[in-house]
Amino acid sequence: MALAVRISTLTVAVTAAALLAGCERPPVDSVQRGYRGTGMQHIVNPRTLAEQIPLNQAPAGTPVADDSGPRAGQVFQNVKVLGHLSVAEFTRHMAAITQWVAPTEGCTYCHTDNLADDSKYQKVVSRRMIEMTQKVNAQWTQHVAATGVTCYTCHRGQPVPKEIWFKAEAQNKRADFIGNLDGQNQAKKVVGLTSLPYDPFSTFLKDDTQVRVYGTTALPTGTTTAGIKQAEKTYGLMMHMAGALGVNCTYCHNTNGFGSWDNAAPQRATAWYGIRLARDLNNGFMEGLTKTFPAHRLGPTGDVAKINCATCHQGAYKPIYGAQMAKDYVGLKGPAPAAAAAAAVATPVDAAASEPVATVATATK
């Protein structure tokens, strides 16, 4: 009997140790961001930070090339995106993109022996990704500011970015005792190993759904209502954003009123634009490439890989800790001047991209 008790006690102790191993252990650093007693503290784990810093360093660049001489589009065949650059600067851009995306595979990752050939899907995709990068840098400055993005921001030397998402497979509900149609009650890393819906991305980063937790009235009336399912998905998205940026809630929110914009940190407005940026890129660029990718590059339900906050941030509050790589690559700052002018005449500027922060303050993230 005594032996059984000792074995049981040992089992409990081992189990408790295993559970505690997943918790944060001291010391952790904290920065007070609001009044004492309100929980307005930003928590930083120095051990996690020590792991993140080496992974978020910008690669060495090369000097900007001579901009004189003929344009790349005049010398090379089938240059549809960066043809306005000089031959020297175009070559520099191509060398940099190779190092950012496929340093092991080299030029042959996208090209055949005939550089003008478009038979490889990687080349078709990369051309579209350059256009996407140009749009982010030119039209989404509310989120990326002057820092901008390059191919390296997401790829980090890998052909496929480490952080992407696909639509979640339908949940096996068995006797219908767990979950719902959106997938829930399974511990998933994307929502912090909680029972929250583990596909908040389709709802908020693809579909145009408002981020809501609660309504502004006691009863479900008006247009500001939020059901339990919408609130749970909102929390799932917030868990993802916190992990993707390596921050806690107070980085954007004031704990006195999470829904209030009046005392929220400026980062909340930046995040508001970031949600709409991801939605714009997923619908305007990634979805259109579904038929371009081969089947093995698609998700379990046949959809294309898409973007979320972690795709760029990868654990850092600013991608690559704010390294301004884009300023040295004029071809990625925006489309060719003539193309940009034509686009401005043909289509109006995205309303979500141009909405001033003063207006955003009346809405919610």
Image (cartoon, helix red, strand yellow):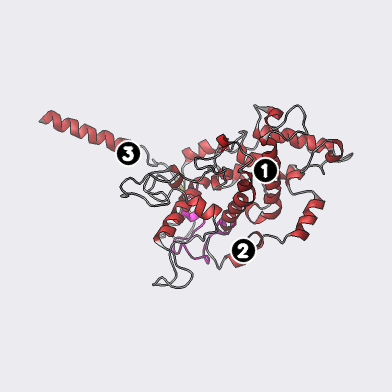
Q: Which mark is residue 129?
A: 1
Check disc 1 and report its element: helix, strand or loop.
Answer: helix
Q: Are marks 3 and 2 in contact (CB under 8 Å)?
A: no
Check disc 2 and report its element: helix, strand or loop.
Answer: helix
- Mark 2 and mark 1: span between their CA atoms? 28 Å
Residue pictured at 53% horizontal, 38% vertical = 52
Circle 3: residue type: Leu
- Mark 3 and mark 1: span between their CA atoms? 43 Å
Whole-percent x, y for residue 185 in the image: 36, 48
Q: Is-magenta flag for residue 250?
A: yes
Choose the circle earlier in sequence order: 3 or 1: 3
**Residue 103 falls left or right of residue 189:** right
Circle 2: residue type: Val
Q: In the depicted view, which residue is nearer to us: 297 or 224?
A: 297
Q: Which mark is residue 357?
A: 2
The furthest residue to the left: 1
Q: Magenta span covers which residues? A: 246-271
